[in-house]
Amino acid sequence: MIERRNASSPTGADGEHDASAIPGADGGGPSGADSGDNDEQIGVPDTRPAQRRDRGWPNQRTLLLYLVGGLLIAAIPVVVARFVDQPPGDTYTIDIPPGTATAIAAGEDVEVIPDELDFTLRDVLIIVNRDSVAHTIGPFEIGPGQQSEHSFNEVAAISSYCSLHPSGGISISIGE
């Protein structure tokens, strides 16, 4: 290890010039100019992070951030448009009168609802069960004396069980 001496006294103890005290005297640094690193040691590798010389293109992390930001900016209006300023749908009410289950059990043809129902997005279905028995209409089960409300927010096609039809089936279609 070579030690640097104070620049004001470049001579050694015997009065001779100490070559290690002169910046650049070893031939490795800038000749006659101070590199700015007073703690530099010869033979020890420089562990400082390398300076980025190429400033033309951003790095991968920056590009990824730009891409994610662009996608978010593009997606926000689509999401907001789905929930804001959309016209309300229509409201449909199904009223199940008292004695419906008894009439169906007796084999009578009870026409409470058709076996195919068509809705559009944002429509609302209200089911009022005034019967003394629970009824199932597709995915909706309504207890005796209860009322339920369902809004349609997704396009779907449902074929399922219905207790109001002798065939036991119903088709529900939700379109745009």
Image (cartoon, rainbow, N blue to C red):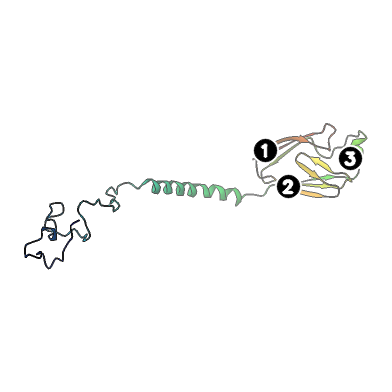
| Relative horizontal placement of residue 114, taking residue 1 as reference (left or right) | right
Q: Secondary structure at mark 1?
A: strand
Give the CA separation, mark 3 to mark 1.
Answer: 28 Å
SS of the residue under disc 3: helix
Residue 29 falls in image quadrant: bottom left
Type of amino acid at the residue the image marks with label 1: Ala
Would residue 10 appear left or right of 162 to someone viewing this image? left
Q: Return the x and y of residue 172 as percentages of the image width and height.
A: 73, 37
Q: Which residue is mark 1?
A: 156
User: Where residue 64 appears, x then y in whole percent?
Assistant: 42, 46
Per the image, the residue denoted by label 2 is: 150
| Residue at the farthest front position | 14
Earlier along the polypeptide chain: callout 3 or callout 2? Answer: 3
The answer to the question of whether label 3 and label 1 lie on touching residues, with beta carbons closer than 8 A, is no
**Front one among 132 and 112:** 132
Along the line of sight, the residue nearer the viewer: 117 or 136: 136
Q: Please indicate whether residue 69 sits to the left or right of residue 139 in the image.
A: left
In the rendered image, the quadrant that contains the C terminus is top right
Q: Earlier in the sequence, mark 1 or mark 2?
A: 2
Residue carrying label 3: 101
The one of 30 and 109 positioned closer to us in this rendering: 30
Q: How many marks?
A: 3
The quadrant in which the N terminus is found is bottom left
Q: Position of residue 121 (x, y in %)?
A: 66, 43
Looking at the picture, which amino acid does disc 3 mark? Ala
Alpha carbon distance from label 3 to label 2: 23 Å
In three-dimensional space, the C-alpha distance between marks 1 and 2, rounded to whole angstroms, equals 14 Å
The residue under the point 23% across, 52% down is: 44
* Mark 3 neighbour class, 10 Å CA radius: few under 14, some 14 to 19, many 20 or more: many
Q: Is residue 41 above or below residue 172?
A: below
